[in-house]
Each structure stands twice: as C-alpha cells, then as structure tokens.
Amino acid sequence: GIAHEPAEIGRYPARLVTEAERLARLVDDLFELSRIQADALALSLERVPLGELVSDVVASATVVAEAKGVRGPVFAPAQVPEVAGSPPELARVVGNLLDNAIRHTPAGGTVEVDLRTEDGVAEVSVRDGCGGIPDPDLDRVFDLAYRGDHARTPGTSGGAGLGLAIARGLVEAHRGDIAVRNEPGGCRFTVRLPLA
C-alpha cells in the first residue's frame, strides 16, 4: 500500500536487484581483504601476457565509461611483457584502478591506460581526469576504507573505499608495488610487477 502507481511499483524490483548486486560485491571485497590481511592469499602463478590481460579488462570497462560519458579507457600497448602472476587477481587490480578512474573522472573527461617495461619491471598505469588528489591525501588513498573528500565521492556513486586497498594487497602479493601521483588535470596510478 505504500506505492500505487504501476510505474513506481515496476521500479522496485530493479532497485532491489541493483542493491543486492552492490551488497554481493561488497561482501566479495571484504572476503578478499580478509584473505589478504590474514596472509591467506594462495596465488596460482603462471606466465601472464600482461597486454592481453589489460586489453580484456579495458574492453569490459569501456561500457561503464561510455554510460558515464567518459572517453576511453584509451589503451594501445607498444609492448606486451609477460609477468609471473595470477590472471584473476591481476585483472582485479587493473579493474579496480579503472573503476576508480572512471568513477572520479567527470563526463567528457578521458581515462588512459599505459603499459611499458623498464629495468626488468612491467608498469601498468591508469591516468584519470579527477582534477588531482590533495597532497596530504596521496599517502592515504590505499588505506582501508579511505574514500577521500566529498568532491571525489559525490552522492552515492562512491565505493566503500576497498578497491584501492585490495589492489595494493594483490600487487604486493605479486611482489610488486603500486603508487599514485598527481598530474595536470588528474592523477596516475602505477603498478610495477617483476617480469617473468
């Protein structure tokens, strides 16, 4: 008896499904974090062609970017290095970085992905158009549940602050490192992994 209009009643199932999916993702994130923090993450390592893996993740993220009006993710690898890694976990790292970049880039902005090798290390970087992160917050973006200020997480579009913490844990489990720096108009997240 709360809703009477058929159109209004018809929106409830879709809203319930959306919220159930969001909660399922949150539970999955919490489970992954608990495995990382308990040092219970058992990686099944293999030779991973990083260019292919990144291309697949970029293709999946393109739909979300287009729906938000964000250009990209732009990705044209010049090199296709291989790393020793677990494909699902590495895909999750890149996916989390892209999700974060798309969420914080305003409509009309561009997200770029770059892949290169240097000194025995493969580097994957994701550049967004968020306008930058305040300098005092740069060291905190990978902290558990850190979401930044309201300018970076407007309305309900912000996540729970778990994606970057998960990315850091997964990268470190692969004996790599992850960093962020401001660039004009946005910031760049860079993952460095040892070559296979």
Image (tube, rainbow, N blue to C red):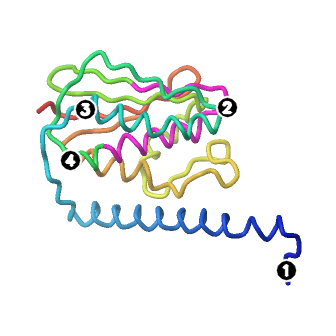
Task: State the residue at coordinates (37%, 40%).
Answer: 94
Residue under pointer 1: 2
Which marked residue is nearer to the observer: mark 1 or mark 4?
Answer: 1
What predominant SS class does the magenta segment belong to? helix
Q: Residue at x 32, y 29 (%)?
A: 124
Q: Quadrant of the N terminus?
A: bottom right
- Frontmost residue, 157 versus 168: 157
Q: In this rendering, would 80 be left or right of 113? A: left
**Pointer 1 and pointer 4: residues touching (CB < 8 Å)?**
no
Residue 50 is marked as: 3
Q: Give the mark nearer the N terminus: 1 vs 4.
A: 1
Farthest residue, direction top: 78
Q: Which residues are magenta?
A: 91-113
Q: Position of residue 64 (x, y in %)?
A: 55, 41
**Residue type at numbered disc 2:** Ala
- Label 4 sits on residue: 86
